[in-house]
Amino acid sequence: MEAPGVCLRGLALVVEKDAGPRLALRYDPCPGCDEGRLFRDLSPTDLAKLFSQPRAKTDQLVEVQLDGLLVVSCPAEVGDVQENDDEVVWGEVDVAADAAAPPPPRLKRFDVLWAATAARAGDLHNAWTLESLERAAKDVRAALRHEERRCGYV
């Protein structure tokens, strides 16, 4: 999407257990806006199925553009990954040598969807760069995966 920036039009959390992807959360910061209506108007089932990514896209940045709406995500597996796969340093508070083993994760996969539209000239003070939106997608993925592993739920 060629624009000086993007405006966030919604945020969603799609989770996958055994029954396939389902929408767990949808946040629309501007319910009266015409931009990004597709994100708001899709049914929960359609939104989850349309934007959930195949396993081959796990831990990769994915951008899908549809009807002027850009959806950026970074799907994640909850299972075992390399020690510092997310390039995040969590600190010693999260790691206790004698702590009980964490409960098994309840999710197999999850994906946070960031819906955005091109910023108009008047919206540039609230606009994100595409790079900052991509970084946010990766950071939130890392934080949620960490919490799922640490305590067994997001």
Image (cartoon, rainbow, N blue to C red):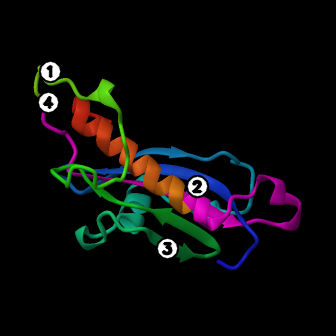
Question: For the residue marked with disc 1, what is the amino acid?
Answer: Ala
Upstream in the sequence, badge 4 or badge 3? 3
* Image quarter (top left, top right, bottom left or bottom right) of the C terminus: top left
Q: Nearer the viewer, mark 2 or mark 1?
A: 1
Q: Amino acid at mark 3?
A: Val
Is residue 107 left or right of 144 when viewed as pictured? left
Disc on res. 103: 4
Give the residue at mark 3. Answer: 64
Which residue was labeled with disc 1? 99
Range of residues picked out in magenta: 104-133
Marks 1 and 4 sit apart, C-alpha to C-alpha, by 12 Å
Describe residue 134's horizontal placement relative to residue 81 as left or right. right
The local crowd at label 1, few if under 14, some if 14 to 19, many if 20 or more residues have their Cα within 10 Å, is few
Q: Is residue 94 above or below residue 66?
A: above
The residue that label 2 is drawn on is: 40
Residue at image location 14% in from the left, 30% down from the top: 103
In the rendered image, residue 124 lying in the magenta stretch gets the answer: yes
Kindly report the distance in space between the C-alpha atoms of the residues bearing marks 4 and 3. Answer: 34 Å
Question: How many angstroms separate mark 1 from mark 3 (CA)?
Answer: 41 Å
Q: Is 124 positioned to the left or the right of 74 in the image?
A: right
The label nearer to you, 2 versus 3, is: 3
- State which quadrant residue 97 falls in: top left
Front of the two marks 1 and 3: 1
As measured in the structure, the alpha-carbon distance from the residue carrying label 2 to the one carrying label 3 is: 16 Å
- Please say if the residues under marks 1 and 4 sit with CB atoms less than 8 Å apart: no
Q: Position of residue 134 (x, y in %)?
A: 53, 62
Earlier sequence position, callout 4 versus callout 2: 2
Location of residue 99 in the rendering, given as x and y in whole percent from the top left corner:
14, 21
Residues at discs 4 and 2 in contact (Cβ within 8 Å): no
